[in-house]
Image (cartoon, grey):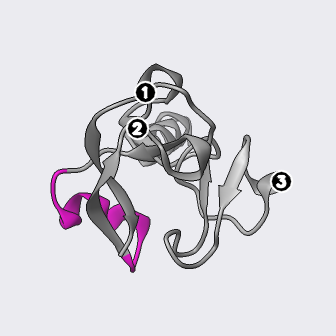
Amino acid sequence: MRWMLPLCAAVVFAACGDDPVSRAVGARCDLAAECDERCLGPGGDWPGGFCTVSCDTSDDCPGEAACVANEGGVCLFVCAIDADCAFLGTGWGCVELDRKPTGVVKACRGN
């Protein structure tokens, strides 16, 4: 039975992996209370709802996210092609958006 404890710990840590989705950015939501800060949607540009945080620059965003000008400045996942957004579920695609404060960036948004 002692061998099960290390095995269980290994399974738990492997399940954590490198999933970029969190209550800060990317989790599905209906209400802001389900997120660290904001809930966009659900519907339209945010299929299933999207947890995010407000930003002024991409330095304000966690991990693989960039600050885009939508909604007054929010963090969205950076992408190169639609397949990069598949982890968010059906209805998401990779689109070019205005980066905040300047420039453009390709990020995941409802399509």
**Residue 37 location in percent, x, y?**
73, 42
Q: Is residue 11 visible?
A: no
Label 1 neighbour load within 10 Å: few <14, some 14-19, many 20+: many
Horizontal and vertical percent for residue 103? Answer: 28, 34
**Numbered tag placed on residue 58 in the rendering:** 1
What's the residue type where badge 2 is placed? Answer: Ala
Between marks 2 and 1 in the image, the one whose residue lies nearer the viewer: 1
Q: Report the residue marked by disc 3.
A: 33
Would you name the residue on which mark 2 appears? 65
Residue in view at x 39 percent, y 41 percent: 17
The quarter of the picture where residue 56 lies is top right
**Residues at marks 1 and 3 touching, judged by CB atoms closer than 8 Å:** no
77, 21: nearer the viewer: 77
**Residue 98 in magenta stretch:** no
Secondary element at tag 3: helix
Residue 31: image tag: none
Q: Position of residue 10 (x, y in %)?
A: 43, 38
Residue type, label 3: Ala
Crowding at mark 3 (Cα within 10 Å: few <14, some 14-19, many 20+): few
- How much space separates mark 3 and mark 2, taking CA atoms? 21 Å
Q: Nearer the viewer, mark 1 or mark 3?
A: 1
Q: CA distance from mark 1 to mark 3?
A: 24 Å
Magenta stretch?
80-91
Q: Residues within 10 Å of mark 2 (few under 14, many from 20)?
A: many
Q: Quadrant of residue 90?
A: bottom left
Q: Earlier in the sequence, mark 1 or mark 3?
A: 3
